[in-house]
Amino acid sequence: MSVRKVTVATLAGLKARNEKAVFVTAYDYPTATFADRAGVDMILVGDSAAMTMLGLPSTLQIGLDEMLVFIRAVTRAAQHAFVIGDLPFLSYQPSDETAIRSAGAFVAAGCDAVKCEGGARVAQRVRAMVDAGIAVMGHLGLTPQNLGQLGGYRVQGKSLAAAERLLRDAEALERAGVFAILLEAVPAETAAFVRERLGVLVYGIGAGPHVDGQLVISHDMLGNFVGDISPRFVKRYAEVGTNVERAFREYASDVRAGVFPGPEHCYPIDPADESLIRAARQTRKARPAARSVPAVEARP
């Protein structure tokens, strides 16, 4: 039975029926497979892979080639979900041509859309990608690629003036042709303020319930992120990291105690062949070791 692929039209239909879209990150084939089987609507191959998968301090250190490795793994797994690739830092900002080439590489690798950070100042790049036939999602609020300007991981849009600035950026992206906008780390009321004034889809990550769907970082919800960041908006659905560490400890203990592998973990052979091999082992043990002969030095 064929699986129906989620499209931009599918996502618009969810909003029309007032149904929330389910949106998670994935960076590898197994995680994307499990998410896809679970029926999630969208998978983001985020530049957060820099931190979740590579142990880097921020998203600024990951490049296009590294992202493409993760994207190819995820798109091989996603039979149902709509896959969005996160354009990394400096892969779209320098020029329209750079943006189109980077986004085109993602689409060629199997992405259904790309995502980029910023509002009015990247609208020209968004328009160039859209005009090239590429579906683009915008990203506003807390934009990790701009942490230097934002002063760190800070909630955005906490005043009416800030909410209005956020709206102006969102409207610029809408005019540029995005099919959706992701709002990160903004108060729920601010997210509702923006969403109610736009015609495009609006999703949230730490933006409250008044949006068209929710994104979470899979490592946060599964409890296997190695690092100090622990967003308050994440609900923990599993403790994968704790369970994995426990499994490794038990494995190490069994190996050191000599209880793994046991008989049940070994391949059986015919008893007659086993006896012959055992006898050959004993014969080899009984044979005296060959005496080494020192090498004769050549005379000058």
Image: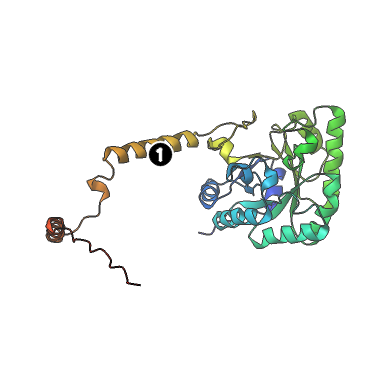
Q: Residue at x 70, y 31 (%)?
A: 208
247 w.r.t. 137: above or below: above
Q: Residue at x 85, y 28 (%)?
A: 160
Nearest to the observer: residue 18 or residue 151: 151
The part of the image, by quadrant, that contains residue 91 is: bottom right
- Looking at the image, residue 256 sits to the left or right of residue 121; the answer is left
Pointer 1 residue: 248
- Looking at the image, residue 97 sits to the left or right of residue 43; the answer is right
- Residue, far front: 300
* Visible residue check, residue 143: yes
Q: Position of residue 154 (x, y in %)?
A: 74, 31
Q: Position of residue 100 (x, y in %)?
A: 77, 60
Nearest to the observer: residue 66 or residue 180: 66
Q: Residue at x 72, y 40 (%)?
A: 144
* Number of numbered discs on residues: 1
Neighbourhood count class around disc 1 (C-alpha, 10 Å): few under 14, some 14–19, many 20 upward: few
Q: Position of residue 188 (x, y in %)?
A: 74, 30
Colouring convention used in this rendered image of the protein: rainbow
Nearest to the observer: residue 5 or residue 50: 50
Nearest to the observer: residue 134 or residue 50: 50
Quadrant of the rendering where the C terminus is positioned:
bottom left
- What amino acid does circle 1 point to? Phe
- Looking at the image, residue 168 sits to the left or right of residue 217; the answer is right
In what element is the residue under mark 1? helix
Q: Residue at x 58, y 35 (%)?
A: 227
* Visible residue check, residue 6: no
Q: Position of residue 76 (x, y in %)?
A: 56, 58
